[in-house]
Image (cartoon, grey):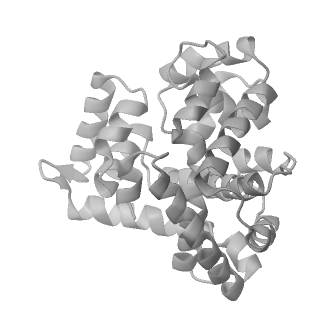
Amino acid sequence: MTPQLARRAWGSLETLHVVGFFAPQVQQAYDRFAVPATRAGYFAARSSPLGRVDPAIVVATFYVFSPTLVHRAVPAVWAAAPPETWAAARAEAVAACLHEALGEPDVAEVISLAQEACAGLSPAGRPLFAAWSGVGWPTDPLMQLWHAGLLVREHRGDGHVAALMAAGLDPVEALVTGGLASNSLEFVRTTRGWTDEEWTAGLERCRARGLVDDDGLTAAGAEQRRQVEETTDVLAVQGWAHLGEERTRRLIELVAPLRKQVLDSGVLPGWIRSRG
């Protein structure tokens, strides 16, 4: 099992999973709780298996979001509804989106493969994954596939935070360099809640370290991001190694038409499709 193959497998499921972050029906479900804070539903649903946590826990585990942004939403979201209600609202909306985009495909084989990969994931050092691993699997087949994508994503995400910290990149530095590396700078700049002053200070720290210049990432910055992604990939091999190379390739093959249908449905923003 190579890190590159593991990354492809994660990417296959990721397109299905991010419906929970971007589909307008999900935001509409959150709006019912009438919490005005920006991204309130995102913080509530994603952190829900941790329970009614203090905002400091969300700041620590979500890493790249401004603490100020988090504190505006948490614990206000828990006053509006308990964690499990936020999670259920997201799941209901995601299920509706996936069934609208995909219909009722036969996903029994790919679910079996995805669940086997998830069975090989360890919670050690992975707080968000550990919390979600204790949540029961849905009964709806498409939501079982989505839940597998969630587990794989959170396991990988916890490892990515470790890689960023090992590289000495604080949250804003991680956003600046990662945004430049992935051509998503404007998206992360406008969605993570940092003030103009905080963003500028982070950019200047990157300049001082020789990671960016007026043209974007320097060679040193590009190399650092390559190392961060490489470390993330290595740390994310575990579940796919448990599944094995042949069955991992089979999962990628089975997910490919579902992924295309979701992208073609228009439920996700166009820039996601442009990422390939």
Quadrant of res 50: top right
- Can residue 59 be seen at all in this image of the molecule? no
Q: Between residues 191 and 124, which one lies in front from this camera angle?
A: 191
Q: Is residue 204 left or right of residue 184?
A: left
- Residue at the left extreme? 214
Comparing 143 with 66, the one in front is 143
The residue that appears at 74% across and 51% down in the rendered structure is 143
Q: Position of residue 2 (x, y in %)?
A: 57, 82
Residue at the extreme bottom of the image, as rendered: 246
The residue shown at (56%, 48%) is 18
| Residue at (41, 32) in percent of width and height | 191
Quarter holding the C terminus? bottom left
Q: Position of residue 71 (x, y in %)?
A: 57, 18
* Depth check, front residue: 224 or 193: 193
Total numbered labels: 0
Vertical comparison of 168 with 118: above or below: above
| 176 shown above or below 166 | above
User: The N terminus is located in which quarter?
Assistant: bottom right
Q: Nearer the viewer, residue 223 or 132?
A: 132
Residue shown at the point (64%, 19%) measured from the top left: 74
Residue 70 image point, x, y percent = 55, 23
Q: Does residue 41 appear in the picture of this structure?
A: yes
Residue 241 to residue 273: above or below: below
